[in-house]
Image: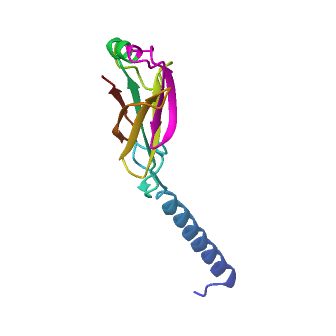
Amino acid sequence: MATTQNEMKKVKMLLFGLVLFSATTFVGCKKEGCTDPDSINYNPDAKEDDASCQYEGKEVFWYNQATADALIADGATALTYYVDGQVVGSSAASVYWTGAPDCGQSGSVTVTKALGNVKNKSYTYSIKDQTGFEYWSGVSNYTANTCTAKQLTL
């Protein structure tokens, strides 16, 4: 039984369609992206991590009434907050909290730092009054997808 040229074309077209279908189906299953839910660019549809994950961490600075009273008694009226040498917020020295505020809470000094592709990163901080006198300084550790409260005491 001889195969006609027309039948050969049909077989080739069928094989081509099968190969094309297989290629698009299997390539589509390997969608790449960030697969870490702690990242800011998490992609729930990604099946394979492509090392593109980016992270950020937050810190809120606060102090209680005793510290506010001590600041005022020392002549401080305003505070400026610096992280890595950059101004990140300010407040009146008389503003205090009875407990740690939530990150982003109205009236709080909350700092959000990009951590790049690492989950933990350290930054320096400094808090000065209106004359430039430094009351606090140190190093803060920021962790991906968390808010850390730093209580300032005198």
Q: Nearer the viewer, residue 111 or 52?
A: 111
Q: Nearer the viewer, residue 134 or 83?
A: 134
Point out the stretch of residues depicted in magenta: 72-97
Q: Nearer the viewer, residue 113 or 30?
A: 113
Q: Position of residue 121 (x, y in %)?
A: 36, 47
Residue 14: image quadrant is bottom right
Q: Residue furthest right?
A: 6
Q: Position of residue 76 (x, y in %)?
A: 44, 20
Q: Position of residue 6 (x, y in %)?
A: 69, 80
Residue 96: image quadrant is top left
Compared with 66, 125 (above or below) is: below
Position of 3 compared to 74: left or right?
right
Q: Residue at x 61, y 77 (%)?
A: 12
Q: Position of residue 37 (x, y in %)?
A: 40, 42
Q: Nearer the viewer, residue 141 or 66?
A: 66
Quadrant that contains the C terminus: top left
Q: Residue at x 53, y 66 (%)?
A: 23
Total marks in image: 0
Residue 74: image quadrant is top left
Q: Residue furthest left?
A: 154
Within the magenta stretch, is there residue 117?
Answer: no
Q: Residue at x 46, y 41 (%)?
A: 113
